Amino acid sequence: MTAHVPSDALGRRVLCGTEYATVHYVGGVPPTAGIWLGVEWDDPQRGKHDGTYEGTQYFKCRHPRGGSFIRPNKANFGVDFLTAVKDRYGLNDQGDQYGTENTLVFGKKTVEFVGMDSVAEQQSQLNQLVDISVRECAVSHAGQKEEISRTCPNIRHINLSKNLISSWETVTAIASQVQNLETLNLSENKMKFPSTSTSVSSVFSKLRILALNQTQITWTEVLLCAPGWPALEELYLTSNNITVLERPDNVLQTLKLLDLSDNQLLDGNQLHLIAHLPRLEQLILRNTGISSIHFPDAGFGCKTKMFPSLKRLAINDNKISQWSSINELDKLSSLQSLQCHNNPFMDTEKNPETLRQLIIAKISQLEVLNKSEILPAERKGAELDYRKIFGNDWLAAGGNWNPEKNKPSEEFLAAHPRYSLLCLKYGAPEEGELKGQQPLTLKNQLLTLTIKCPEKPEQKPVEKKLPESMTIQRVKGLLYRLLKIPGSELKLSYESSKTEGKASTGTAEELQTARRQYGQPVPELTYGKM
């Protein structure tokens, strides 16, 4: 049962079979003989107690049943980085004995050199490695000094996720031998980070992408390490102990992407503390527990100075219940893309198309919503519908077609900050548009079309009710079934008498825009052969 126990075993990460644990105790456990390791399992279901045995507490665990005692010979303390690389890529020295034979002739005597070509080939392959993944290879330390830089001089990208790295010092020892390191994934390594500010060095001078997901790092520790990341552009910090944020002073100034998903932030105001990162273009806040977003430095219709470069924002799976938070996003001067699925505010509207229209109308510069591009025609339609849907509310709140009498209440402007701008853009909603405004049910979103063929005056016009989302291609399919004319031979146009009492015509592709602008129905759809 005897086995070697490293002198620095306390605090080390170990692997026992397929289970990961941290060593919290090394020593005897009376009345048994020999050395035991007291470990806390990553999976508390694997444990038996909290570090207490027979009334004596040998170590502490976060979970009441997360600890166990194991013999040293059951614990794998890991391997050095280069050994893991050779094992992963099939370049370990054990393969040399199976290498091919080389022969060299000296006069009449032939001398055999076993494995020489495999050694040269191995060295050549290690020299060429640029992108290395040793995920789940039990890496625990750097190995001999300068061995990595001599053997693998061209490494730029390293995946070290889910290994046995227990401290930031180990990471630094590995990275210091990789001169051109650009990408580093350390996720799923439970390790200790510096408790004081780290000295600025050139170890991570070229590092652009860093993943520290599930490493138990706090935001304070991030800021203590950050002086050593002068060129960092992407930082992934999902599923950690981050609940509160602090302002990054003179650090993370090059950051373009920050992922804080699956950290339960104290509240949405925590975002104000990172709002002045000058180059931040993408912020991912999935499942962070935030219930509201507010930029207090800007009023209705104004742009905030916060997040000046933010183009892409993900707030999926949160607790945002009020539309006012969506209104606030219009204050972001650079926002182009938004993901907001699975928030309570989305339950206020059952029709997904109407929900999408409302968000588009509320955020003026948005180009992509929930990964779907917003085309100009869709934006125009959404804004026209928004102007009409809330027209009666606008009138009731003090809105008026006469500019001198148009004084909507503060409450209305707070709920609909863009409404006045939409009225300036498209004109105030006409009285006829607002009469008999119906709830946005499927029945009330049907278009009534009168279909006729000028080339066949003897044929009676056909009236059909069609959903507003129906594409022109599907309209052509309908006409084929009705009239037996192939879609490729159809030429469609529409006529409307909604524009200032005069008939107007346009292409079929403009049909949906016309419906939104002039209300239901769009009277006539005409067709003919091309």
Image (spheres, rainbow, N blue to C red):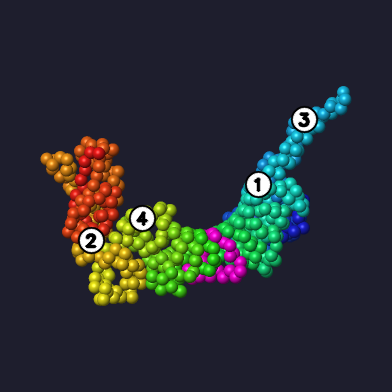
Sequence-first disc among 2 and 4:
4
Q: CA distance from mark 4 to mark 3?
A: 69 Å
Instruction: Identify the secondary structure beneath mark 3.
Output: strand
**Distance from label 1 to label 4 (Cα)?**
44 Å
Q: Which span is picked out in magenta? A: 245-274
Rounded to the nearest angstrom, the CA distance separating label 2 from label 3 is 87 Å
Question: Residue flagged by tag 4: what amino acid is it?
Answer: Pro
Report the number of numbered marks: 4
SS category of the residue bearing label 4: helix
Query: Which is nearer the N-term, disc 2 or disc 3?
Result: 3
At numbered mark 2, what does the secondary structure look like: helix, strand or loop? loop
Distance, label 2 to label 4, CA atoms, is 26 Å
Q: What crowding class fits label 1: few (fewer than 14 Cα within 10 Å), some (14-19), or many (20 or more)? A: some
Q: Residue at x 72, y 37 (%)?
A: 121
Asked whether disc 4 touches disc 3, contact meaning CB atoms under 8 Å apart, the reply is no
- Contact between marks 2 and 3 (CB within 8 A): the answer is no
> Which residue is the site of mark 4?
376
The residue tagged 3 is 101
Picture disc at residue 438: 2
Pointer 3 with pointer 1, Cβ within 8 A? no
Q: Position of residue 297 (x, y in %)?
A: 46, 74
Q: Amino acid at mark 1?
A: Val
In percent of width and height, residue 375 lies at: 37, 54
